[in-house]
Image (cartoon, rainbow, N blue to C red):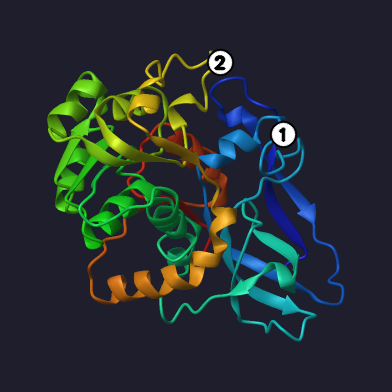
Amino acid sequence: MSTTARQIHLASRPHGWPTLDTFRMVDVALPELTEGQVLVRNTVMSVDPYMRGRMNDVKSYTPPFQLDQPLEGGAVGEVIASRSAERAVGDMVLHGSGWRSHAVLDAAATRVVDTTLAPADAYLGALGMTGLTAYAGLTAVAGFAPGDTVFVSGAAGAVGSLVGQIARLLGAARVIGSAGSAAKVAHLLELGFDAAFDYHDGSVAEQLAAAAPDGIDVYFDNVGGEHLEAAIAVMNRGGRVAMCGAISMYNSTEPPAAPRNLAQAIGKELTLRGFIIGSYQHLAGEYAQRMGAWLAADEIHVDQTTVEGLDNAPEAFLALMRGENTGKMLVSLS
């Protein structure tokens, strides 16, 4: 049994874009287990855009990462020692103490997952927070209805790619996505999107208007900024925006210039609603049933980009920020 763990700490708070110097690898001694605790050897961890916000020392819906302390995030690992009657050695568990090789956790802070039904990484993606974010944002936050035209930004990412596919399965009239390369655009069309465009190819507003000649009813926003402005411009009356993320602004040191047309939300009677997935856990059971059925019927394609080794987790995060991933960005520790 391991008595030490390798952890990635926050070495400094970035101003603008993080760099490799933002992170530091540290070896630490593991504490002895107390009653009700388990020792988990992590096998796979997630890196996600929201983690950039936690690197800033600002008040938000979740506490900031602390300097010279390990970062946190979703991970799945194997229980290798237990002082809990609820968790046995060999159990595979989902928890929030990623960015480290091993974690000592209260058993109550873990959830057993069945890796005979789905691989461990699925519980960080389609069967985890990522998938629930896509489903809840589309159905509960944006109030999707069959026949809606849906636009998704960051559509080749982990959440966006699922939003588009779920919208199609639930009866969308048209699904449109934006992405950052020609290859990603081609992939979105393979996933069943009706139209897609590369936002580098010109005005987002003009490309979206061309892709949605009859307007859009729902915008699932992962990007913010120019994309949000473009969506407002082409939204139909009564349109709804689920504001999930604003990755275009996460590393900016200047105030955003867009959206400059927010006043259109008045006359169009638009709804712009931000959300965090912690407020929608009541939908987890419903979502698990639906996604399980879609996966079993091979109706959903799940993309992921996997980087090998804890040492490479910082670079995986930076690559995510640069948009180099397709689907979920994961780090394999096994």
The correct choice, above or below, for 291 with respect to 268 in the image is below
Identify the amino acid type marked 1.
Answer: Lys
* 138 left or right, relative to 43: left
Q: Quadrant of residue 240?
A: top left
Q: Is residue 326 visible?
A: yes
Residue bearing the label numbered 2: 253
Quadrant location, the N terminus: bottom right
Identify the amino acid type marked 2.
Answer: Thr
Secondary element type, mark 2: loop
Q: Position of residue 23 (x, y in %)?
A: 64, 35
Q: Is residue 1 visible?
A: no
Residue at coordinates 72% horizontally, 57% vertically from top-left?
A: 5
Nearer to us in this view, 217 or 53: 217
Q: Position of residue 321 (x, y in %)?
A: 45, 34
Secondary element type, mark 1: loop
Q: Position of residue 65 (x, y in %)?
A: 71, 40
* 301 left or right, relative to 213: right
* 283 left or right, relative to 150: right
Q: Which mark is residue 59?
A: 1
